[in-house]
Image: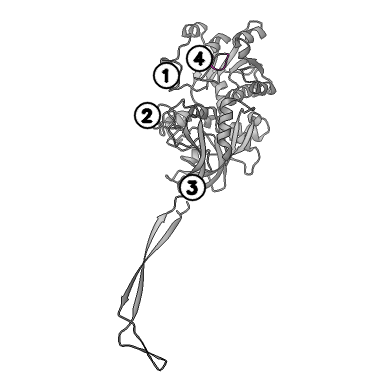
Amino acid sequence: MSSPICRIFPTPRASLEGLNTLDFDNGLESRSKRVFSLSLNFEYETQEIKQVMRAVVYDQPFKVTVREVEKPKILHPDDIIVKVTTSCICGSDLHMYEGRTAAQQGIIFGHENMGIVDELGPGVTALKQGDRVVLPFNVACGRCTNCEEGRSAFCTQVNPGFGFMGCFALPSEPNLSHRYVAMGPYPGGQAEYLRVPFADFNALKLPPGKEHEADFALLADIFPTGWHGVQISGFKPGESIAVFGAGPVGLMAAYSATLRGASEVYVVDRVPERLAKAKEIGAIPIDFSKGDAVQQILDIRGGKEVDRGVDAVGYQATTGDGKTEQPNAVLEALIRVVKPTGGLGIPGLYVPSDPGAPDSAAAKGYISFPFGKLFEKGLTIGTGQCNVKAYNRYLRDLIIAGKAKPSFVVSHELPLDQAAEAYDKFDRRVDGYTKVLLHP
């Protein structure tokens, strides 16, 4: 661990002891009987200089700025400091950007991060300075029961009160320091440096160099989350699947289903650029602005329902106009389109409170949906945040082997200083913004 930089402030204290007199006699200097003594005593004070870095900081709804903040420090022996090389903008960042969470002014955004190990705490043993790593968006201790069972998204050590998980970059609700929407008490990584707790467990090592940078960056969240959505739907190779939402997670779910041997993949959205991306990977695009998405799928399949469904939209679902929010829209559609005894995977985000909800029930996290029909059809539901650590090393190896290239979803790679413009355009779904990577 490097030592703090200090500045030395000398404080002189001068004193005259005696008096010096100079007698000039015929050009000769004679010393008087009195002796001159000047002493300078210095007292040294040290003051630590705060090191700063650039970071994306939340100011208010629909406004972020890049400005200087304090650089993170090692706070625990298990910490590392990572010099960030890539940090992604996620749909979850947009929930905060729009003021739809408990995000407080001044937090640093960014929970999809990768970079180079710059400093290590004395307790870190599996990593070394210079290692290239990617970090899961959800922080976990690696030691509690849930972590040991592969459920790192539900770590009880970083989240003892257990509302959601401890993660990078989202603000805490009062007295609930790890609830969503805090992804932490941990500042985010849309910055030049990031502190990573429990580093031996959380950091996934990558091959050195710069190869596959965009692909590896997606291991922090959306590739594992898309895979997770398919997994918790109960999917098996050869089955058909409908994915609602063609944002980054939805596209990753469709891609994951294809990698895992789906016979047919339907992707529902209304943004042309997103639907075009879905078509590029062999999925069947369904534009719900042109009519009921479920009926379109049933018409294509001759009235036959699909085996599995994935909700990659979450609580800000809309009707076909793309403007009117209807939080239960995707849940209702999935129950209609999935066959009896099929399964639903719901990685799309739902929250226990929503300041901008369209009604009082949704504001408290209550969403109605046809549970009677769900029961009648014998459908199963899998929900919850992705256990990134359960998937990321295997997905990394698929990338290295050339079997997966998730970076097809990336539309823009920009310097950190352009973050404000990127947030604006990504939020408005304009100019082809589907997935943005920031490089400090």
Sequence-wise first label, 1 or 4: 4
**Is 19 positioned to the left or the right of 338 in the image?**
left
Say what amino acid the circle numbered 3 marks.
Answer: Val
Instruction: Report the residue marked by disc 3.
Output: 52
Q: Are marks 2 and 4 in contact (CB under 8 Å)?
A: no
Which comes before the other along the chain, label 3 or label 2?
3
Tell me which amino acid carries mark 2: Gly
Residue type at mark 1 is Ala
Asked if residue 290 is among those painted magenta in the image, a careful observer would answer no
Q: Quadrant of residue 28?
A: bottom left
Q: CA distance from mark 3 to mark 1?
A: 38 Å
Give the number of the mark in front: 2 or 4: 4
Q: Which residues are magenta?
A: 320-330
Q: Which residue is mark 2?
A: 161
Residue picked out by circle 4: 326
Can residue 392 be seen from the camera position used here?
A: no
The circle drawn on residue 48 is none
User: Could you tell me which residue is drawn at 52 percent across and 13 percent down?
Assistant: 329
Quarter of the image for residue 221 reads top right
Label 4 crowd bin: few (<14), some (14–19), many (20+), radius 10 Å? some
